[in-house]
Image (spheres, helix red, strand yellow):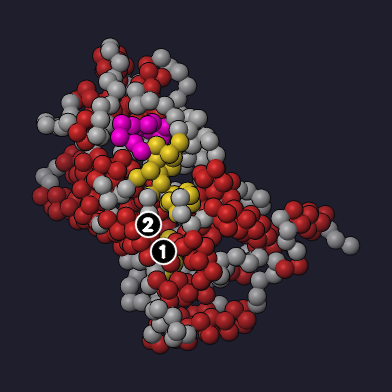
């Protein structure tokens, strides 16, 4: 007789069109055989050299947990965030959670994902009814893209995240979300693997990811040069904070492209962002719903790239605005130097919330939650309900305006049109309230 737990699992599987008996991972010896065949494959774009393949296979044969890809001469120090995939420790419930999520993802991806993404999933065989073994998955990723996996134990700081990218390592967690959970704020295998891995086969997306890592190196290389000549702790702290701020603005470009990007294909909006495609609910929401705003962008234009860098967002719910790239080739313009220069200009400008519609925006549709650029200030002043994004961007902008924009800064020229003025009397009101330390929460965590 089945236990109640097994009966419940069978019922959950049936709801998603899955046969519970199929949720059975291969034993180690079968996984090793498949890995050995993979490592010997010379028909791939990037064959694995024997001097790397042999110790890699030996580690897998010995049952060592996968920690970080070792198929090239490069590596990255994960410090306290290092982790390992202990494959045989996954429970039936965790494998079933993967199977259910994949089943739901496939239904939405086939309808709303871009063509290149769907082809990438076929290359990496993302699917099935069991969590992938990272030894085999890492080898396949390297053979196609020269990227590898690095296991981490939680959300990691943005600096480390992009350091990994500069070495072509993608940080992946090892835990699986709860059964039948569609959306979660922190990344799990369902996001990192079922969401991101297929994007590595889209050359321009992998290119953008690597360039963000190289942009991080530029930002923190300049920081290190400045720290070397700093004479006191106060200056050193200011230098560090400035570097972190610049990386935050670079991170926003990544967020609105690699994580939550849409693209036009054959006259229709399609998703390629991993954050979107790892959530069946947000996949449909991002393309079909009338609630979010969708803006068409050309990332090769400085103004459009700056729009991404100056737009704040939250990770706690579906996005309020999506940016739709006209076509993939335009992302080639996101060089490391251009990402850094855009971040530096963003540091000098007022920012937008994820609900704002700005002058010069090419609007595909106005979302139900959209607001004018100055509504966040009015809500703050009248103590009306604001989400954290509106509040944070309002406080930052008002502080910037009180201290004055950089000399010669012409906002109308930057944004291709006039931004609504801050309401009369609001700056003086804010100055007095800020002096009372009322707005101490106008920051956001720098983690990814």
Give the secondary structure at mark 1. Answer: loop
Residue drawn at (21%, 36%), measured in percent from left and top?
A: 414
Does residue 429 lie above or below 300 as drawn? Answer: above
Classed neighbour count for the residue bearing mark 2: other residues with Cα under 10 Å, few (<14), some (14–19), many (≥20)? some
For residue 239: magenta?
A: no
Is residue 431 shown left or right of residue 119?
left
Give the secondary structure at mark 2. Answer: helix
Q: Residue furthest front?
A: 267
Of labels 1 and 2, the one closer to you: 2
Q: Is residue 445 visible?
A: yes
- Percent x, y of residue 335: 25, 57
For residue 360: magenta?
A: yes
Does residue 147 lie above or below 79 as drawn? Answer: below
Question: Residue 348, which numbered label?
Answer: none
Residue drawn at (38%, 49%), measured in percent from left and top?
A: 325
Q: Determine which residue is flagged by label 2.
A: 328
To which quarter of the image does residue 399 belong? top left
Residue drawn at (42%, 58%), measured in percent from left and top?
A: 81
Q: Determine which residue is flagged by label 1.
A: 202
- Percent x, y of residue 120: 49, 66
Magenta span: 351-362
- Percent x, y of residue 154: 47, 53
Q: Is residue 259 visible?
A: no
Q: CA distance from mark 1 to mark 2?
A: 9 Å
Q: Give the main secondary structure of the magenta stretch.
A: loop
To which quarter of the image does residue 384 belong? top left
Q: Are marks 1 and 2 in contact (CB under 8 Å)?
A: yes
Count of marks overlaid on the render: 2
Residue drawn at (17%, 26%), measured in percent from left and top?
A: 404
- Percent x, y of residue 377: 35, 21
């Amino acid at each position: 007789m089945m236990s109640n737990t097994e009966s419940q699992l069978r019922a959950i599987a049936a709801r998603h069109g899955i046969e519970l008996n199929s949720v059975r991972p291969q034993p180690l010896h079968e996984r090793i055989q498949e890995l050995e065949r993979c490592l010997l494959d010379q028909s791939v774009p990037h064959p694995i050299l024997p001097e790397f393949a042999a110790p890699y296979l030996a580690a897998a044969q010995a049952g060592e947990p996968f920690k970080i890809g070792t198929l090239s001469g490069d590596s990255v120090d994960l410090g306290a965030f290092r982790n390992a995939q202990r494959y045989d420790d996954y429970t039936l419930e965790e494998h079933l959670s993967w199977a259910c999520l994949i089943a739901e993802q496939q239904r939405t991806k086939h309808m709303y994902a871009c063509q290149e993404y769907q082809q990438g999933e076929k290359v990496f065989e993302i699917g099935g009814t069991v969590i992938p073994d990272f030894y085999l998955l890492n080898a396949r990723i390297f053979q196609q893209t020269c990227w590898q996996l690095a296991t981490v134990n939680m959300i990691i700081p943005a600096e480390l995240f992009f350091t990994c990218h500069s070495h072509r390592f993608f940080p992946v967690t090892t835990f699986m979300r709860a059964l039948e959970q569609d959306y979660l704020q922190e990344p799990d295998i369902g996001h990192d693997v079922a969401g991101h891995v297929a994007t590595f086969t889209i050359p321009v997306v992998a290119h953008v990811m690597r360039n963000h890592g190289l942009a991080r190196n530029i930002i923190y290389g300049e920081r290190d040069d400045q720290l070397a000549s700093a004479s006191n702790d106060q200056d050193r702290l200011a230098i560090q904070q400035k570097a972190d701020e610049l990386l935050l603005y670079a991170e926003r470009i990544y967020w609105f492209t690699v994580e939550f990007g849409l693209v036009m294909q054959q006259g229709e909006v399609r998703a390629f962002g991993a954050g979107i495609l790892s959530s069946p609910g947000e996949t449909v929401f991002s393309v079909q719903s009338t609630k979010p705003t969708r803006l068409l962008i050309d990332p090769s234009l400085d103004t459009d790239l700056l729009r991404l860098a100056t737009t704040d967002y939250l990770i706690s719910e579906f996005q309020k605005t999506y940016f739709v790239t006209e076509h993939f080739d335009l992302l080639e313009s996101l060089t490391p130097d251009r990402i850094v220069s855009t971040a530096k200009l963003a540091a000098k400008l007022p920012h937008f919330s994820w609900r704002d519609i700005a002058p010069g925006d090419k609007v595909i549709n106005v979302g139900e939650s959209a607001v004018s650029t100055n509504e966040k200030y009015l809500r703050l002043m009248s103590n009306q309900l604001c989400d954290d994004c509106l509040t944070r961007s309002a406080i930052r902008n008002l502080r910037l305006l009180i201290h004055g924009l950089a000399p010669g800064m012409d906002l109308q020229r930057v944004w291709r049109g006039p931004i609504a003025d801050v309401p009369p009397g609001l700056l003086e009101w804010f100055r007095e309230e800020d002096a009372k330390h009322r707005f101490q929460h106008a920051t956001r965590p720098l983690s990814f």
